[in-house]
Image (cartoon, grey):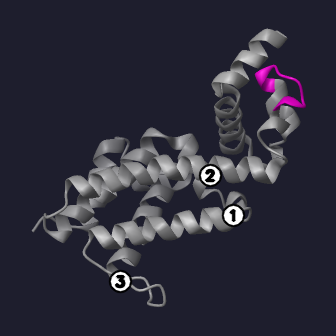
């Protein structure tokens, strides 16, 4: 990559996105221990110093990757809940669970990143805050107005346990094979129907 191209990439902000995308692939396929800023730069064909203009170290790279993924996923979930606002709570939860599981199936690399146990160890206050906002937005759209000192509602806890458990089945080859359902859409539908039966 020429210096002119590199400057142009920075100007348009493309390198940051490429760094995040490449990092996600490495974490999903090889594990977080295989990730290094130098390796990502090499795979993208830029100097090992280029990423430092965006990320100071590996932890900051991973944290920004998680925030970027969570932001897009949560935006999708909020949109689904908003579009189902006013419907019976069971219908809202069905739509939300379908949306989350379908996102995991459609974006397996990103989903594996945010479910990776070693990635969670690097969670900083921004990630914890983002998770808290996600819980609050789900509760608010389900009609709960919880005070900060109050515990998370049972409905929200139930939803998140189903969402994360369903994601584990979709993303873990061993669990997926145990389901004996090769068709992803049918498996998602079964998980949603069992969690929130149509009344």
The answer to whether any part of residue 172 appears in the image is: no
Label 3: which residue? 154
Label 1: which residue? 123
Instruction: Looking at the image, tell me whether mark 3 or mark 2 is earlier in sequence order.
Output: 2
- Residue 158 sits in which quadrant? bottom left
In what quadrant of the picture does the N terminus appear? top right
Residue in view at x 35 percent, y 67 percent: 138
Whether residues under marks 1 and 3 lie with C-beta atoms below 8 angstroms apart, the answer is: no
Residue 4 falls left or right of residue 172: right
Residue closer to the observer: 30 or 45: 45
- Residue 14 sits in which quadrant? top right
Residue 20 falls left or right of residue 188: right
Whether residues under marks 1 and 2 lie with C-beta atoms below 8 angstroms apart, the answer is: yes
Place of residue 90 in the rendered image (x, y in percent of width and height, measured from the top left): 19, 68
100 w.r.t. 182: above or below:
below
Q: What SS does tag 2 mark?
A: helix
Residue 88 falls left or right of residue 179: left
Residue closer to the observer: 192 or 8: 8
Residue 196 falls left or right of residue 43: left
Question: What span is in magenta?
Answer: 43-50
- Residue 5 sits in which quadrant? top right
């Amino acid at each position: 990559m020429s210096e002119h191209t590199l400057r142009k990439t920075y100007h348009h902000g493309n390198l940051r996105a490429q760094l995040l995308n490449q990092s996600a692939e490495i974490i999903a396929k090889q594990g977080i221990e295989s990730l290094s800023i130098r390796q990502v730069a090499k795979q993208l064909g830029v100097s090992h110093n280029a990423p430092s203009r965006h990320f100071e170290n590996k932890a900051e790279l991973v944290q920004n990757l998680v925030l970027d993924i969570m932001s897009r996923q949560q935006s999708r979930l909020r949109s689904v809940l908003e579009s189902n606002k006013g419907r019976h709570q069971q219908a809202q939860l069905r739509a939300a669970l379908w949306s989350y599981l379908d996102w995991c199936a459609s974006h397996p690399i990103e989903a594996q990143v945010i479910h990776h146990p070693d990635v969670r160890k690097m969670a900083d206050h921004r990630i914890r805050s983002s998770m808290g906002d996600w819980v609050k937005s789900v509760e608010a759209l389900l009609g709960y107005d919880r005070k900060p000192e109050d515990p998370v509602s049972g409905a929200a806890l139930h939803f998140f346990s189903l969402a994360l458990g369903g994601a584990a089945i979709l993303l873990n080859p061993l669990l997926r094979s145990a389901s004996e359902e090769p068709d992803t859409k049918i498996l998602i539908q079964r998980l949603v129907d069992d969690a929130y039966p149509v009344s």
